[in-house]
Amino acid sequence: MLDIRLIRDNPELVKERLRRRGGEVWRSIDDVLSIDAERRAAETEKQRHQAERTRLSREIGQGRKEGRDTADAEAHVRGIGEEIDVLDQRTRGLDERQEELLLGIPNMPHEGCPEGADAEANPEVRRWGQVPEFAFPAKDHVTIAKELGLVDFEAGVRVTGSAFVVYRGAGAKLERALISFLLDLHTEQHGYTEVLPPFLVNADALIGTGQLPKFADQLYHCGEDNLYLAPTAEVPVTNLHREEIVDAATLPIKYAAYTPCFRREAGAAGVGTRGLIRMHQFDKVELVKICAPEDSMAELELLTADAEKVLQLLGLHYRVIELCTGDIGFGSARTYDIEVWAPGQGTYLEVSSCSNFGDYQARRMKLRYKDAETKKNVHCHTLNGSGTALARLYVALLETYQQADGSVVIPEVLRPYFGRESIVKA
RNA sequence: GGACAGAUGGCAGAGUGGUCUAAUGCGCACGCCUGGAAAGCGUGUGUGCGCUAAUCCGCACCGAGGGUUCGAAUCCCUCUCUGUCCGCCA
């Protein structure tokens, strides 16, 4: 959520930044301003009446004690009470309207965010490694996984539906090995604290990180209990400190969490959906940071480096791109995507999206810390990034390490977790 | 799922219709005292919104929402959460 004070004090700056995203969202700033002015006028009026009521009510109490007749005064105050009710309805309505508008306005892209209309304009920041060459026709992961019996696509459909899969045998163990490897790397080498949060979250948590109210159609909802399946660990983990004033000395707070992620992917059918690439349920190890505002840009670089380390250790070729103003996510101020090379696809696949949300999420979830110098409560900055998503990593791994004989070699760093050096046909 | 009890400031805890502008204690900060410290003494110490150049000041908040009343932390209703016991259960 954007700071209403910033909107009030510098509406042109806010509009200009929002305009860079493309579309028409920036126009709603004028609506916010007019409602804000109306709201404050009504609020001031209401408070004036309330102060008057309190004063007169005290006089009535005093008068009764002294045995005076207070009937006239009571009738008068009752009238004030009725006016307060009317004003209260009004301010409440305006409050809600303003909140609703603000929740629907995306974050302002950071001033350093590259300008661009869509994904085509995202600049490449760097590359690591080489596109692997094969002396034989490279297969795609679906073929490899089926031949080695690692993933049962049909069973997933039978048990649940399309875009759900069942991992089997060595295939299941490989997934588990990857999760353990990722968590150990980030907790032991990068200083993150491991958390294992609930996979179901409430609406307040989703509003806090920005999935609600705008993206309800992308979420699985359990109506009976009004809970949602988390689309990413970002939601339960960032909300760990919702409505808290955290101790400044604990910043930056760094969490790593494994969770499955559940996404309806409404409207995405048929687009890059082959095999494991786009599923309704996939595993992910997520990195979340909560820090002081002045540190968030540096923390974003570190977070991205932490995620990149995964691909470096696994020996997978990747590139980092930065999302331009037209492609950046709803709540993000600045985002790097890490894309791993998938030889069987002949393309890069997004395995991590590392974002600095500034104070956008923190304001939505009332997450603050007390500034040591000013003694003021300041909204923290929040960041998150995948470290990394598992399914596409799995794709890149099978496709990169496939051998001419149909086997798949397991990278060195995974062997302690997987227990073997390769996967061969049974 | 059922029964009973409870939810008040950073913490403990009083308050059951009218200076509650929330007692008291602990903690914390600052000051006095001291050679220095402890103790003691004094002062201060929540969140949000409104007003304002800012301070002041004002309004709201005693788990959440609604109601009764001239006036609600206090009375009534609904809900949530916590504790204890029972039931069910990996």
Image (cartoon, coloured by chain):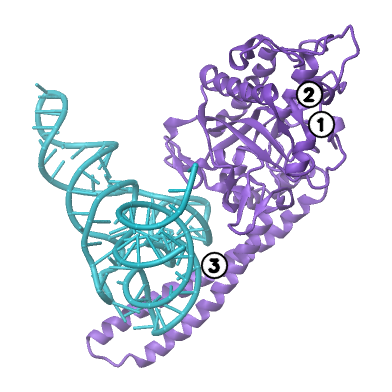
Mark 1, residues whose alpha carbon is within 10 Å: few (<14), some, or many (≥20)? many
Residue A43 horizontal/vertical position (percent) = 54, 67
User: Quick check: A7 left or right of A149?
Assistant: left
Location of the C terminus of chain A by quadrant is top right
Q: Which residue is mark 3?
A: A43
Tag 3, which secondary structure?
helix
In the rendered image, which quarter is residue A372 located in? top left
In the rendered image, which quarter is residue A347 located in? top right
- Asked if the residue at tag 2 contacts the one at tag 1, i.e. Cβ–Cβ closer than 8 Å, the answer is yes
Give, as a three-letter code, the residue at label 2: Ala
Q: Earlier in the sequence, mark 1 or mark 3?
A: 3
Give, as a three-letter code, the residue at label 3: Glu
Give the letter of the purple chain: A
Q: Which residue is mark 2?
A: A145
Residue A214 horizontal/vertical position (percent) = 71, 52
Q: Which residue is mark 1?
A: A275
The CA distance from mark 1 to mark 2 is 9 Å
